[in-house]
Amino acid sequence: MKIPRKYIKYLHVSRLARFEHERIWLVQDFQAGLRHAKDVDAQQSVLDEMHMELDLHDEEVSVYLTNKWAAKARRLMIPIPVRYGDDGRETPFWDQGKYTGDWYLTNRGLAMLRSDIRQEYKERNERWNPIISMIVGGIGSLTGLISVIAGLYK
């Protein structure tokens, strides 16, 4: 669903949703510029500018996602993938932006970090499963016992 630009600031939408709408608006603006371009050189200029703006936008989204997932990993005390290996070379988990110069996790790095976070949540929830099962079983047993007793006194 496309939300008009002037209303986006009044809605409580996530930052990722705003990024997605901004991308849609960027593409629409450049498509309008392509329609108004007179010759091939002007069209190529608009396309080059569009690719640069979209790359910049993608870098901003990647930096936002990296910061979001890294903060969650820090809260759970999960190690974040290293930027440089033991030999001093860059690892395949990080990339540096061409336009902003900011470092962000690659898709491979984000997938590894998200997997570690999901595993940590799973391990934290596993300790409660037996306790909850016992409580639910006890409630079921009490309900059955009450229904048998109530049936005897009818």
Image (tube, grey):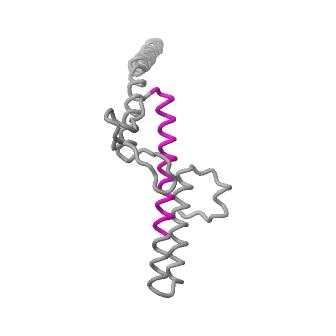
64 lies above or below 23: above
The percent position of residue 67, horizontal first and vertical second, equals 51, 41
89 lies above or below 41: above
Task: Specify whether residue 99 is painted magenta.
Answer: no
Residues 79 and 49: in front is 49
Residues 74 and 89: in front is 89
Quadrant for residue 151, please give it. top left
Query: How many labels, in total?
Result: 0
The percent position of residue 144, horizontal first and vertical second, equals 41, 17
What residue lies at 39% left-to-right and 47% top-to-bottom? 106
Q: Residue furthest front?
A: 88
- Can the viewer see residue 28 in this picture? yes
What range of the chain is rendered magenta? 50-77
Quadrant for residue 113, please give it. top left
What residue lies at 39% left-to-right and 35% top-to-bottom? 82
The percent position of residue 34, horizontal first and vertical second, equals 50, 79
Q: Residue furthest left?
A: 87
42 lies above or below 88: below
Residues 119 and 43: in front is 43
100 lies above or below 153: below
- Can the viewer see residue 151 in this picture? no
The percent position of residue 91, horizontal first and vertical second, equals 34, 41
What residue lies at 55% left-to-right and 64% top-to-bottom? 2
**Dominant secondary structure (helix, strand or loop) of the stretch shown in magenta:** helix
What residue lies at 53% left-to-right and 71% top-to-bottom? 28
Task: Specify whether residue 58 is painted magenta.
Answer: yes
